[in-house]
Amino acid sequence: MMMNNTNLSHLFRPNLLQNARSQLDITYSHFHFGNAYFGIRGTEQSRSSGGLRCRQTSCKIPCRSPTVKTCSHSSKRRFSTIKNSHFDRNDHSSAAITDRSDTMMCHHLSSSAQTFQQVISSRRTVSNFIIRPSSQQSSDRQFLREAISRGVECAATAPNHKITEPTTFHRILTPSAASTKLFDIAYEVTLQQLIQKKLSGEESCRSEAMRKRDKWANIPAFLVVTVGGMEDQPDSSDGCRVDPYEELPYAPPATIRQLEDYASACASIQNLLLSLHSEGLGCKWATGPVIRTGAFRDLICCGRNDMVVGLIMVGWPKQLPRMRRSRRLDGEMLRDVDFDIIERDSEV
């Protein structure tokens, strides 16, 4: 169908043009993991035929650990074309309208996709963290605060049915009054657990509990993740429970909505872990008895229907553990559902 210039003029209104330009910007980001650098190349999507092509760019901005540097490169000609395309910003004629049936004709794994997948697949649970020099405490503290904020922004993009936004992140930086209280709780809970198990004498139990306290005291930051709208969680004031360090029973999600909200909180945590990992930080998602005590819930001012999903430990990793996987990908973790094959097998 022929269209005159007027029919296409609405495509070039300033606000729409700006939106289109923002989609065509090419970014090149560097992420630093230990001694390895990863670069993400952007892809540019042509407005003409919907085909994809990669335009390689170079970024001269150095990247220093533990920060992430990002720069944006914009093409001089935003509406660039690919082969067999006739679209031009200065040509509003009918030649600009092309068949979009070849939109997904170009299938290739871009370098940005490979890098993003590498970021995901290289994440590990980190239990041992580097003890940073005290002279860097101020700069480290500021970096951690900002990195966690960026991580929570990424966490907020996790799928959330009905947009209930049930997840809350409670940040604790070391050293602080809150972190000291957290370490005391960890000591008391560990001591109580060890004494109840009667694996050794009281002095040995106290020594082991203090070892755990000291280990936690060297972790630069913590995040407590809670999800609201759950079943009322048991409290240390219920019944005859008076010990704030006693492990409380667990009240799991009871409705579909609660289960979906809990799943959303878990997805948020994964986004957070990946964001922090991309900035060179290691994390551990802990769910031990410490988080199920009245003292811990009081520390972060939990509501009665708030469930603690986990305690995230954040710091600079000493090393990244190797991945141990017992299940194979094809046939076990990944299975194809093919009805043709099922029908053929049933006929035999």
Image (cartoon, rainbow, N blue to C red):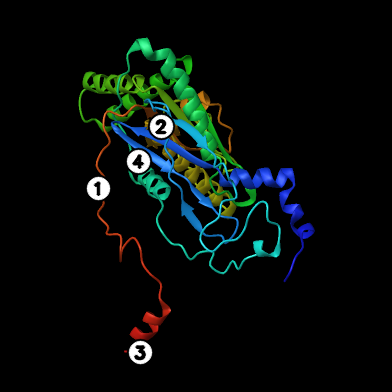
Q: Position of residue 118 (x, y in %)?
A: 35, 45
What kind of residue is marked 2?
A: Glu
Front-lying residue, 161 or 53: 53
Q: Disc 1 designates what residue?
A: 324
The answer to whether one can see residue 106 in this image is yes
Q: CA distance from mark 2 to mark 4?
A: 11 Å
Sequence-first tag of 2 and 4:
4
In the shown orientation, is residue 310 left or right of residue 75?
left
Left or right of 24 on screen, residue 62: left
Give the mark, 2 or 3, whose residue is nearer the N terminus.
2
Indicate the amino acid at tag 1.
Arg
Residue 273's tag is none
The residues tagged by marks 1 and 3 sit, at their Cα atoms, a distance apart of 40 Å
Mark 4, Cα crowd under 10 Å, few <14 / some 14-19 / many 20+, is many
Image height check: is 298 above or below 285?
above
In the figure, is residue 324 to the left or right of 171?
left
Quick one: SS at disc 3? Answer: helix
Secondary structure of residue under mark 1: loop
Give the secondary structure at mark 4: loop
Mark 1 vs 2: CB contact within 8 A: no
Q: Amino acid at mark 3?
A: Glu
| Front in this rendered view, residue 96 or 182 | 96
Which quadrant does the C terminus fall into? bottom left
Q: CA distance from mark 2 to mark 3?
A: 55 Å
Please say if the residues under marks 2 and 4 sit with CB atoms less than 8 Å apart. Answer: no
Q: Which residue is mark 4?
A: 123
Amino acid found under the numbered disc labelled 4: Arg
The disc label shown at residue 347, or none: 3
For disc 2, the marked residue is: 279
Vertical side of 181 occupied by 167: above or below: below
Spot occupied by residue 313 in the image (x, y as percentages of width and height): 39, 30
Other residues around mark 1 within 10 Å, as few (<14) / some (14–19) / many (≥20): few
